[in-house]
């Protein structure tokens, strides 16, 4: 297939591009600047979608960038980088002379209301409880294409774990120094997925004609993983203790109360339809996933 990937040069996009090319597909990125195997967002808006069989959008500003204050300007960047890029790709697909057969958008499990006990499948309601929940709702609406011209899939991703990027990149040094531990109380659910499996779910959705609708992009072990479980498993993988909690007050001071919700609360998310559609996880268990990442 010829696949156009928005945000293809980022952490998840790099993993997806590597996987797709290893499976014989051609990949063209959409990014800020044009180049080899790459077009710009401006070019996409002006000239339309290049001829392709599938399109994916992974674009989005890093919400948990600790160097950015959670003010109105950054909130607008977070929203625009997701919603406007999705609208641009959806519009290009709708207007294409030969629309792609598949269109995949990767959003987040922040769609679901944080809860210590409720388990969420792809059929669960959400999208209306806080800033991030409403953002995902708006983001997914932006991907809708009139009619039935292409097969649409939404992958709601958990916390993405992998080498050289994602959530792990900011945690490794404190944990290597024996200064790591749970965030806040540590009892909050920790919905996670290995980056290779997130790329694998997207690839599976592109290649499998019957897959459509929402897929939860989390590991099968995720519903039973708390933040404290994750901290202990990462410490064990590194051969280090993981006993020093990051206090709630510090999280809120660094990230702000609204953004702190992403770290201090969580959702028990089940990949029900993801498993039912035939995807087989490479890293279903946390210890194995973390050993792969830190090795």
Image (cartoon, grey):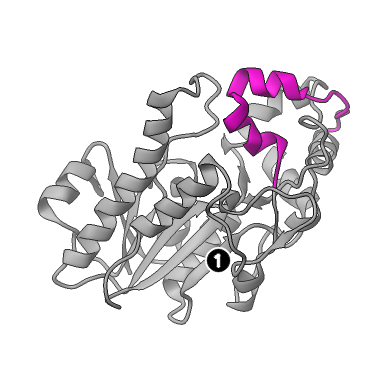
Q: Is 172 left or right of 142, judged from the image as shown? A: right
Q: Is 141 left or right of 286, judged from the image as shown? A: left
Give the quarter of the image for residue 206.
Answer: bottom left
Q: Quadrant of the N terminus?
A: bottom left
**Tally of marks:** 1
Give the farthest residue toward the bottom: 210
Q: Position of residue 26 (x, y in %)?
A: 32, 61
| Residue visible at 61% across and 43% down in the picture | 162
| Residue visible at 77% across and 51% down in the picture | 286
Front residue of this view, candidates 21 and 133? 133
Which residues fall within the magenta stretch? 239-266
Give the quarter of the image for residue 282.
Answer: bottom right
Give the farthest residue toward the front: 128
Is 239 situated above or below 154? above
The residue singled out by tag 1 in the image is: 215
| Residue visible at 17% across and 66% down in the picture | 96
Q: Is 104 left or right of 172, judged from the image as shown? A: left
């Amino acid at each position: 297939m010829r696949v156009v990937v928005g945000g293809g040069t980022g952490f998840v996009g790099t993993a997806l591009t590597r996987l797709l090319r290893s499976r014989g597909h051609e990949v063209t990125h959409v990014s800020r600047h044009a180049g080899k195997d790459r077009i710009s967002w401006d070019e996409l808006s002006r000239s339309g979608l290049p001829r392709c069989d599938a399109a994916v959008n992974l674009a989005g500003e890093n919400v948990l960038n600790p160097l950015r204050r959670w003010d109105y300007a950054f909130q607008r960047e977070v929203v625009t980088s997701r919603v406007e890029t999705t609208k641009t790709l959806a519009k290009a697909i709708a207007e294409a002379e030969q629309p792609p057969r598949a269109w995949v958008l990767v959003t987040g499990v922040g769609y679901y209301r944080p809860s210590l006990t409720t388990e969420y499948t792809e059929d669960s309601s959400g999208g209306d409880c806080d800033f991030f929940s409403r953002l995902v709702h708006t983001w997914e609406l932006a991907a809708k294409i009139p009619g039935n011209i292409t097969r649409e899939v939404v992958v709601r991703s958990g916390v993405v774990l992998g080498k050289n990027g994602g959530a792990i990149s900011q945690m490794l040094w404190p944990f290597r120094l024996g200064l790591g531990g749970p965030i806040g109380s540590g009892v909050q659910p920790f919905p996670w997925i290995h980056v290779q499996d997130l790329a694998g779910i997207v690839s599976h959705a592109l290649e499998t004609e019957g897959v459509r609708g929402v897929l939860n992009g989390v590991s099968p072990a995720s519903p039973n993983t708390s933040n404290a479980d994750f901290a202990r498993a990462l410490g064990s993988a590194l051969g280090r203790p993981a006993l020093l909690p990051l206090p709630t007050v510090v999280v809120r001071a660094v990230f702000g109360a609204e953004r702190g919700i992403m770290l201090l609360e969580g959702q028990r998310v089940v990949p029900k339809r993801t498993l039912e559609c035939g995807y087989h996880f490479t890293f279903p268990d946390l210890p194995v996933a973390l050993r792969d990442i830190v090795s």
